[in-house]
Image: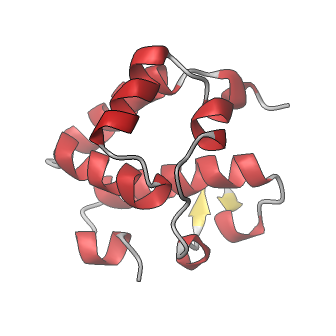
């Protein structure tokens, strides 16, 4: 099992935030991307952070994974997201990819695939 599965989402979230804020993006935009992918709302996301759940639990408890996740394609951390076989790792990399696109200045309409 990957050690990233056991990392707390609360420890990763500030790293995502730091990455996108350095590029002039906002916490609201980051949260919007997370809501789109996972179906969490503001309360649900805050609860996951406050409880310090690990990445495995964070993704196991998502209210509704977006039906358009299969439209997320490309390379992140040297892997094509669409080719990752482990379902949990794939979800984590989907989130990484969206955060990366946000940091690269992609328009929200492009990030939130339809």
- Residue displayed at 53% across by 76% down: 68
- Image coordinates of residue 42 in percent, x first then y, are 28, 40
Q: Is residue 105 above or below residue 16?
A: below
For this view, does 16 lie left or right of residue 63? left
Q: Is residue 114 above or below residue 79?
A: below
- Residue displayed at 62% across by 22% down: 7
- Residue displayed at 63% across by 53% down: 91
* Outermost bottom residue: 114
Q: Quadrant of the C terminus?
A: bottom left
Frontmost residue, 97 versus 44: 44
Query: Quadrant location of residue 109?
Result: bottom left
For this view, does 73 lie left or right of residue 41? right
- Image coordinates of residue 35 in percent, x first then y, are 37, 53
- Image coordinates of residue 99 in percent, x first then y, are 39, 51
| Residue 77 in view of the camera | no
Q: Is residue 20 above or below residue 84?
A: above
| Residue 112 in view of the camera | yes
Query: Quadrant location of residue 53?
Result: top right
- Image coordinates of residue 17 in percent, x first then y, are 29, 35
* Outermost top residue: 51
Q: Quadrant of the N terminus?
A: top right
Q: Is residue 60 above or below residue 78?
A: above
């Amino acid at each position: 099992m990957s050690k990233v599965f056991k990392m707390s989402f609360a420890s990763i979230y500030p790293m995502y935030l730091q990455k996108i804020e350095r590029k002039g993006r906002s916490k609201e935009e980051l949260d919007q991307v997370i809501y789109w992918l996972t179906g969490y709302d503001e309360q649900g996301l805050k609860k996951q952070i406050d409880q310090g759940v690990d990445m495995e639990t964070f993704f196991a408890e998502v209210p509704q994974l977006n039906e358009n996740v299969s439209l997320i394609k490309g390379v992140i951390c040297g892997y094509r997201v669409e080719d990752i076989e482990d379902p949990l790792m794939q979800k984590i990399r989907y989130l990484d990819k969206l955060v990366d696109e946000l940091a690269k200045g992609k328009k929200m309409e492009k990030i939130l695939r339809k």
